[in-house]
Image (cartoon, rainbow, N blue to C red):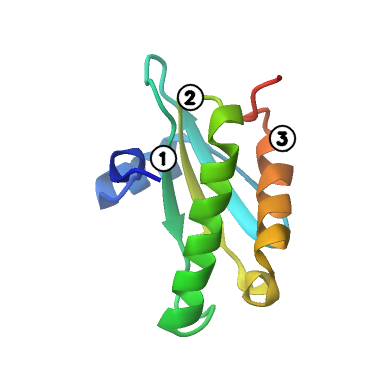
């Protein structure tokens, strides 16, 4: 995932939290806001310290980035998306994380119909 497609600034995170919509399942929380005219979606990832040590948190973020990379062509481009990992992601494999992410994206129609 290219760095220009990531949300890093705290102000942008707060904008999505305050003005966007949210949806969740047991493993992940998804916040999103529509940005008309944006050429590519942007993502922000948050994995709190309660999830585990730095190695585990970075592993979960790698899984999420890779899942977005594999789904890149199917995600609607005009959105800013923030994903917050919950405690059950500690024991999840990459395929489980990807399935959970697909579930959230499809529930909110953020996956393009192909």
Task: Return the x and y of residue 45 as percentages of the image width and height.
Answer: 44, 55
Quick one: SS at disc 1?
A: helix
Labels 3 and 1: the sequence-earlier one: 1
Task: Return the x and y of residue 102 as percentages of the image width and height.
Answer: 69, 43
Q: Is residue 72 shown left or right of residue 105? A: left
**Who's the residue at 65% across and 29% down the image?**
111
Report crowding for label 3: few under 14, some 14 to 19, many 20 or more residues within 10 A (C-alpha): few
Q: Looking at the picture, does residue 17 appear above or below residue 74?
A: below
Task: Return the x and y of residue 56 as percentages of the image width and height.
Answer: 51, 79
Residue placed farthest to the bottom in the image? 53
Residue placed farthest to the top in the image? 37
Q: Which residue is mark 3?
A: 106
Number of numbered discs visible in the structure rendering: 3
Quick one: SS at disc 3?
A: helix
Q: Which residue is mark 1?
A: 16
Report crowding for label 2: few under 14, some 14 to 19, many 20 or more residues within 10 A (C-alpha): many
Q: Looking at the picture, does residue 52 appear above or below residue 114?
A: below
Q: Which mark is residue 77?
A: 2
Labels 2 and 3: the sequence-earlier one: 2
Name the image quarter holding the C terminus: top right
Alpha-carbon distance for marks 1 and 2? 16 Å
**Who's the residue at 46% across and 23% down the image?**
78
**Who's the residue at 74% across and 44% down the image?**
103
Alpha-carbon distance for marks 3 and 1? 19 Å
Alpha-carbon distance for marks 2 and 3? 14 Å
Report crowding for label 1: few under 14, some 14 to 19, many 20 or more residues within 10 A (C-alpha): some
Q: Is residue 42 shown left or right of residue 95? A: left
Q: Hey, which quadrant is residue 70 in on the image?
A: top right
Q: Which mark is residue 79?
A: none
């Amino acid at each position: 995932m290219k760095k220009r497609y990531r949300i890093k600034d705290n102000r942008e995170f707060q904008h999505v939290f305050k003005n966007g919509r949210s949806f969740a399942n047991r493993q992940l929380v998804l916040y999103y806001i529509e940005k008309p005219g944006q050429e590519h979606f942007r993502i922000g990832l948050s994995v709190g310290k309660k999830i585990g040590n730095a190695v585990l948190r970075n592993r979960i973020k790698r899984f999420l980035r890779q899942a977005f990379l594999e789904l890149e062509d199917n995600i609607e481009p005009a959105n800013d998306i923030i994903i917050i990992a919950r405690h059950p992601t500690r024991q999840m494999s990459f395929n489980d994380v990807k399935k959970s992410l697909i579930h959230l994206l499809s529930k909110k129609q953020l996956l393009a119909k192909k």
